[in-house]
Amino acid sequence: MSHALANLPNLVVSAVTGVTTFASSNAIAGFEDADVVTIFAPTLTQVHEVQVNADPAAATGSSGWATLTSGAVNVIVASGTAVTITDVAFGSLRVLARGAEAAQRTFTVVKQFLVT
């Protein structure tokens, strides 16, 4: 048995303006076989929170989103960094801008899974 990597759809946050405006990306699913998920951030002017939903169908629209935490601290993705999630126990994933972004931002997402 070995592990393989697979690209998942990108997470895209539209440009937002205003100091109190938050915008979420599209949501993606496809984590059933994932052992590890990594989100790669582009150049950003704001940090973005990682949000998850138990329901894979949430990728097409749902409430029930929760901010992912680690050690009681919100998991955020900052400019030019990557976040790796090792306990993949969710059905859908998105990111939420914590403030205005002057332009659209695209995050690359990959998963690692076991090949039998």
Image (cartoon, grey):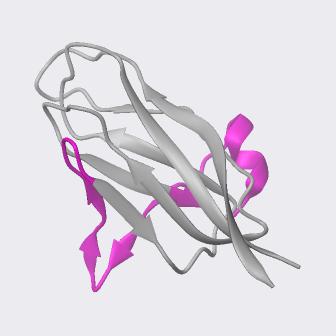
Image position of 103 with respect to 48: above or below: above
For image coordinates 35% across by 17% down, the residue present is 104
Image position of 86 with respect to 95: above or below: below
For image coordinates 68% across by 36% down, the residue present is 61
Quick one: quadrant of the C terminus? bottom right
Instruction: Answer left or right for 62 relative to 93.
Output: right
Nearer to me, 90 or 44: 44
Q: Residue furthest front?
A: 2
* Rendering quarter of residue 15: top left
For image coordinates 54% across by 63% down, the residue present is 37
Q: Can residue 25 be seen in the rendering of this structure?
A: yes
Where residue 2 appears, x then y in whole percent?
74, 79
Where residue 39 appears, x then y in whole percent?
43, 52
Where residue 68 appears, x then y in whole percent?
41, 67
For image coordinates 70% across by 74% down, the residue present is 3
Image position of 77 with respect to 96: above or below: below
Quick one: quadrant of the N terminus? bottom right
Residue 60 within the magenta-colored segment of the rendering? yes
Q: Residue furthest right?
A: 116
Q: Can residue 64 be seen in the rendering of this structure?
A: no
Instruction: Answer left or right for 59 relative to 116.
Output: left
Where residue 108 appears, x then y in whole percent?
47, 40
Residue 71 within the magenta-colored segment of the rendering? yes
Nearer to me, 81 or 75: 81
* Count of marks overlaid on the render: 0
Q: What segment is highlighted magenta in the picture?
A: 52-81
